[in-house]
Image (tube, helix red, strand yellow):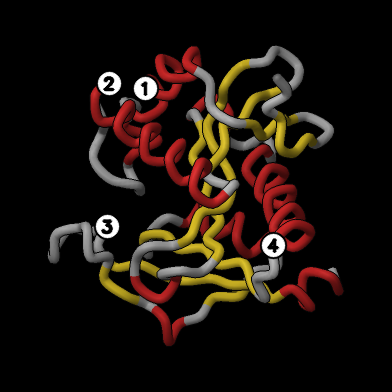
Amino acid sequence: MNDTVVETERLVLRSWRGEDRAPFAVICADPRVMATLGPVMDRAASAALLDRVEAIEAMHGHTFWALERRSDAALIGWCGIIRGDAGPVAGKAEIGWRLAHHAWGHGFASEAARASIGWLFAKLADDSAWAITSTGNTRSRAVMERLGMQYQPELDFDHPRIAMGDPLCPHVTYAISRSEWAAR
């Protein structure tokens, strides 16, 4: 069965497999990875998260897909499109990514996100791609800007699943329209 959704020069975005659970749990247990995303996850929490993203794919045909490096077939994180469920992106095409620390700084997030947005505009009727992150997540905000996404300051919000007062609660919103993407 071919579970590949999108391929780039260096990456494969694909449906999740059983063997992805252990390496994904390692990614979610890394305090460096989770510093701007939320608390470090144990194996049960990361498995529950993968159950959720697999259910999203079954329901919508897209999700935050497994992100595999082509050179060695290693799982290095996730990237893809879900239907947002919080704040100003609720119901909208939300792009997201999470990469293992060892995969940072190689342009993988930008490459995978670019491919995901291209997939979105080729396959779905959405007029825009949206992204959210905690205010202080400068690395993800830089990826959003490299993609041509524009910060939407009027859509700043407190994430409803994060406790008020937690430094990760304040969130920012970015977007790029289909026409802006086509003009790039």
The residue where tag 3 is placed is 168
Type of residue at label 1?
Ala
Q: Earlier in the sequence, mark 4 or mark 2?
A: 2
Mark 4 vs mark 3: in front: 4
Type of residue at label 3?
Leu
The answer for how far apart the CA atoms under marks 4 and 2 are is: 33 Å
Tag of residue 124: 4
The residue sitting at 74% across, 52% down in the picture is: 119
Tag 2–tag 1 contact (CB < 8 Å): yes
Q: Is 86 left or right of 117, judged from the image as shown?
A: left
Tag 4–tag 2 contact (CB < 8 Å): no
Type of residue at label 2?
Arg
The answer for how far apart the CA atoms under marks 2 and 1 are is: 5 Å
Q: Secondary structure at mark 2?
A: helix
Tag of residue 43: 2
The residue where tag 1 is placed is 25
The answer for how far apart the CA atoms under marks 3 and 1 are is: 21 Å
Mark 1 vs mark 4: in front: 4
Crowd rating for badge 4 (residues with CA inside 10 Å; few <14, some 14–19, many 20+): few
Q: Earlier in the sequence, mark 1 or mark 4?
A: 1
